[in-house]
Amino acid sequence: MNKTEFIAVAGFALSLLFHMTRAEVCPTSCNCKSLGEMKGLLVDCSSRKLTELPALPISAKRLYLHNNSLTSVPPGALDSLRSLEEVRVFDNPWNCDCHILYLKLWLEDISAPSLENTRCASPAPVRMKPLRQLTGNELGVCKRLLPIKCLEFFWRDLILIAGAIIALILVAWQTECIPY
C-alpha cells in the first residue's frame, strides 16, 4: 500500500469513526448505558429537571424521560429513534394543547404503555387526563394540526380510493354487458 492509498483509507476510517461517535454521543444531562454490543443504548434522562428534550443518540433502545419538567416535544424530534423498544415520559407537566399532538401520535405508534401512563398537567379542563384519552376538541384550536406529510398521504390515499371505486364500477358494468 502506497502513501496515498494509506492516507485515503485512514481518512475514510476516521470520518466513519467520527460519524458513528457523533451520532452516539450521550447528552450531558443524561446517563447512557450499553445494552450489549449491537443492542443499542439505555438513555436515562429521568429526574434531571429537563425543560426541553436534549439531542438523543439514534441507537437508543430504551429512553427514560420521566420525572422532568417537559411540557411538549417539538414535532419530528423523536423520529430518528427507530430502534426504541421502551419509552417512559410520565411525571412531566405536559401542556395538552395542540402542540402535544406530535407526542401523542408518536407514542401511539411506538409505546402504548407509555401513552397510558402519561397525563396532562394543563390546561385546567384536561388536568390529570391520560394523554391517550384526549380528543380533537380538547386539544384546542390549531393552525395546522397535521404535518404537511400527513396531508400529502391524505391526497394520495384519496386518489387511490377513487381509482379503486372507478375500477369496481367498470368491472360491474363490464359483467352486465357480457352476453350469456
Image (tube, rainbow, N blue to C red):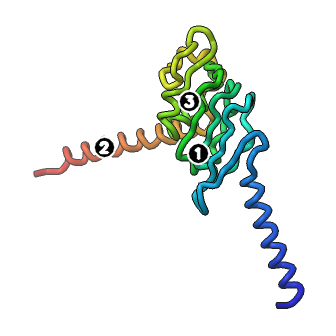
- Choose mark 3 or mark 1, whichever is in front: 1
- Residue at the far right: name it: 3
| Residue 159 picture location, percent across and down | 47, 41
Residue at point 18% right, 50% down?
178
Distance (Cα) linking label 3 and label 1: 18 Å
Question: Upstream in the sequence, badge 1 or badge 2?
Answer: 1
Q: In which quarter of the image is the N terminus?
A: bottom right
| Residue 123 picture location, percent across and down | 63, 12
Question: Which sits in the foreground, 145 or 23?
Answer: 23
Residue at point 88% right, 84% down?
4
> SS of the residue at dot 1?
strand
Q: Of the numbered discs in the image, which one, if any, rests on residue 174?
A: none
Mark 3 lies on residue: 104
> SS of the residue at dot 3?
helix
Question: Upstream in the sequence, badge 3 or badge 2?
Answer: 3
Q: In this view, does 131 lie above or below 35?
A: above
Mark 2 lies on residue: 168
Tag 3 and tag 2, C-beta contact below 8 Å? no
| Residue 33 picture location, percent across and down | 66, 51
Q: Of the numbered discs in the image, which one, if any, rests on residue 62?
A: 1
Residue kind at label 3, given as amino acid type: Lys
Question: Which sits in the foreground, 55 or 146?
Answer: 55
Q: In this view, does 31 lie to the left or right of 40?
A: right
Residue at point 57% right, 51% down?
83
| Residue 129 picture location, percent across and down | 52, 17
